[in-house]
Image (cartoon, coloured by chain):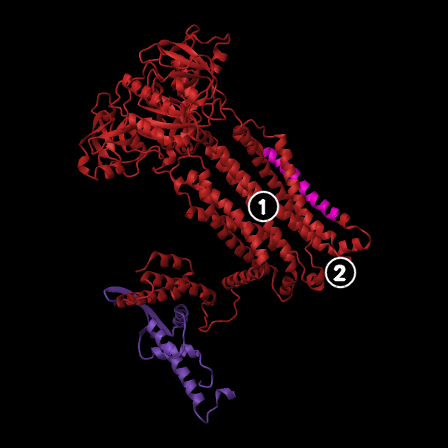
Amino acid sequence: MTDRMPTATHLQFLVLAVLKDGELPGREIRRIIARYGVRRTSAAFYQMMARLERGRWVEGWYEQIAVGDQAVTERRYRLKPAGAKAYDEARAFYESVGVPGRKRWSDA
Amino acid sequence: MRDRFSAVLGALMPRRVRLDLFEPALRDIEIDDLARRRAGRGGLPASASRLAHVIALYIDCLRLTPSVALATRARGHERIVPSRTPVEPLSMLFYNLRHALRLLYREPGFMSAAVLTLALGVGANVAVFAVLEAVMLRPLPYPDADDIIILNHRDQRTGVTKEFIAMGDFIDLSSRQDVLEGLNGFGDFDGTIFDVGEPFRVSSLVASPGLFEMLRVQAVHGRVLQEGDARQGAPPVMMLGHELWQTKFGSDPQVVGRSVRLGQQTRQVVGIAPPGLRFPPQSRADVVVPMTVPAQAPAQRKSGWTFAAGRLKPGVTVADVDAQLGTLSRQMEQDHPAQNQGSQYYALPLRQSLVGDTRWPLLLMQAAVVLVLLIACANVANLLLVRSLGRRQEMAVRMALGAGRGRLAVQVLCETLVLCAIGGTAGVALAYWGVPALVALVPRNVNVPGLDAVGINRGVLAFAFGVSVATALAFGLFAAMSIGRQSAAGALTNAARVSISRTSRRAASVLVVTEVAVTVVLLVSAGLILRSFTRLLSVDPGFSTDSVLTIGIQIPADRYRDVEARKAFYERAFGTLSKNPQVADVGAAVVTPLTGNNWTVPFERSDQPVPSGQRPPDVGWQSASGGYFKALGIPLRSGRFFDSRDRPGGAQVVIISEAIERRYFPEGGAVGRRVRLGQADGEIVGVVGDIRRAGLTDEPRADMYFPFERSPSNGITLFLRTSGDPTAALPSVRETLRSIEPAMAFGAVETMADVASESLAPTRLTLWLLGVFAIVALALAAIGVYGVMAYAVRQRTREIGTRLALGATGQGIAWMVMREGSTIILAGLAIGLTIGLVAARSLRAMLYDTPAADPITLVATAGVLIATMLVACYVPARRAATVDPARTLTVD
């Protein structure tokens, strides 16, 4: 299993990793991945999140929050079982290719 | 928080893009925006910053749309990682549009020519449509305004029409008709309101109470006028206009029930009219007073006239109303032959009544600009055709690599779409600047509401969009079809000799022939109007319009109640003004010539009464002082002008025009004869020259003048012949009149030259627009001819080189090219003249003393066209003559 390339791209893996610890609003996810050097426009970011949603890796919904005395809604996301599985799979792959004595992916 | 702008942007993108990308990102912008506002950060204002972010987001969403569309198509077995091959239709569309933009950017010459041509065509259409929309299509400010009609009167014997109807006929028509919800009289007068601070002038609408029901309006406070208010002997009441109520009565609702003095009568205010109530829409209605109509038609049926309007009953058409009015007119003619002979009433829709004579020129203009657009389309199609020659190899390579003809055709269509979008935008910009100039040409007597607010509104933009898309499809399909005829193998193997097919060449020639023909139609039309206009300018109206100033004045009614007081005032005013060194002659009259006025009076010789049961013929009516004739230079043929002998209560006298003498006193010597004036007789004291009274196109009319000196009124128009510039005399004239009567009110001030010029406004409008469009068409057609001939020369360079090598002279080659060009020009000219002669018939109503088949116009049109087109042919012909055979024969 770990010999095969993971289904998730490195960017999707990063997002899944961010969501591993719990639900987050979209703009927070975007802010965190930006710290890893992944800078996406908000439209491009949400396009990626929409793909993850349609792949049933994450679940998204709108939630009302208060900014001062103003009520607004924001898009929030959490990991779904399939997403957790994809994350584990990718993580196992990256770990396996990094362990000495095992077949390196670049030798394949 | 969600604003309308964002909602509109969201609606402009595919649903999936909106839901997945735009909506969540927009919420982030909102949150950031709120946070920034709470933090009170500087920089751009919050709204501007938010706007910038939303626009950037929208553009970003558009950029990503193709990849979203791709994922949508792959639903069911959707991959989370997208495909990189943009093969889907939507992404192809974006690809083609981007490609088209790049291509156009690389060909600035072609793009400038095409965009300029399209901008002219679209811009002219949009500008004319903007005026047309405001004048003829914009809804009038009443519910179901298309159901409101205005009654008109036509004297079948003279053909003279009036917008008002005789009081006796009004009463009978009101009771007999059953096709209108009611027939309502209306009119206007200027009055003065006292007892509310300083006295001030107001415009009053006098109306039958049913007018409010007809207009479907209710009072804001109090009530509207009711039937009881209009009964004879009813207490005088009035309604206040909303604006007057606000400005002069402080919007006080308690004013309802108060008594206010209007002119010489104190009236109780019964209600406040709703905002903007006016009827007709171009008039003002500061106050509304009831029109009192007698219960029975008076014995003298034509003793008073009123405007009348009605609303069609459900299911009734204007034609139904006309039919019934015709029947009732004939009945009244039988019942009252002495007074109603030849009287016919008919209905005009309110809008038509307001637009008047300007309707046809505007429709004609729209037709003309559509022709200009057709020429523009033909030109751009030609440009594309020639351009496709240079791109044939590119297309061939694409086809060889597997691109289908359909896909290449779509690409060409996309290019034309982009071209039209740019051309359309430039056209709208041109129209934006052109509309004010166009509006300035619309005659002032066209008082349709909204004309002062003509502009590029949503309707006009929709029209511009429609025109641009139609244009793109028109020649885009033409260019796309040429792809289908190309052979990839032929283009690739014969790269140096690329040429468009014989069919395409023929198509290009046909396009140019069409352009030339359409240009000829426009030139003929413009030429006829020009001829007509020059004839009108040389028309002698029968009086002098130079150095004559007209001033409307009104003296206070309460201070000049009796006729002697008014006469004394005018005698003093005329005497003082005539001493002014800048004033040569001064007079007064009720009717200003050349303003369309058609007031008439029956004419009957006392010694030759009209047989019983017959109605005497109508002649023009005018009340004028003796000085009026001198000021306007109307010549005295015999007898005398009115003078101090003509006093109130004195003998009734009249002056007649030559036409009356010719027609009704064929034996001559009309002076001293007597005519019937109502129940009494009057003596003819003078015969003056005929004048064109209603307008310059009017034939010199039979007019009868009544002495102003005998019954001077409070309001009148003064006519002053000045020794220099008429307007320079105005300050001193005003000062003189004010010194005699400080409370005098001044009305419209115009020179007679301006009045005469204004009477030509519809013709001038037509001339200007047709002239401009004809010149544009001529220029475009010349470019078209040049394009085709230049292409032909380029295509035949080798042949020309061979001919020259074999001994042909440069002059002979030039002649050969000119001959080919001439064939196209002459074909277009022949077709254009034929169509132009037919089209000119529709102009007949607008022509004055010019036949539709005016030979001078036709010859001049042909001359201008041939000269221009030969110049367009000359440049390529000259180039052909200077071809170097040595170079052309050695280069493959």
Placement of B879 over or under B58, stated as above or below: above
**Which chain is the one coloured red?**
B
Coordinates of residue B576 in the picture (x, y in percent): 34, 23
The answer to which of B736 and B99 lies nearer the viewer is B736
In the image, which disc is placed on residue B375?
A: 1
Q: Amino acid at mark 1?
A: Ile
Dot 1 alpha-carbon crowd within 10 angstroms: few under 14, some 14 to 19, many 20 or more: many
| Whether residue B312 is visible | no
Majority secondary structure of the magenta segment?
A: helix
Q: Regarding mark 2 in the picture, which secondary structure is present there?
A: helix
**Which chain is the one coloured purple?**
A
Q: Quadrant of residue B517?
A: top right
Coordinates of residue B274 in the picture (x, y in percent): 27, 38
Coordinates of residue B839 in the picture (x, y in percent): 58, 34
Residue bearing mark 2: B887
Q: Is residue B162 magenta?
A: no
Q: Residue furthest bottom?
A: A101
Placement of B272 over or under B373, stated as above or below: above
Q: CA distance from mark 1 to mark 2?
A: 37 Å
Coordinates of residue B572 in the picture (x, y in percent): 32, 20
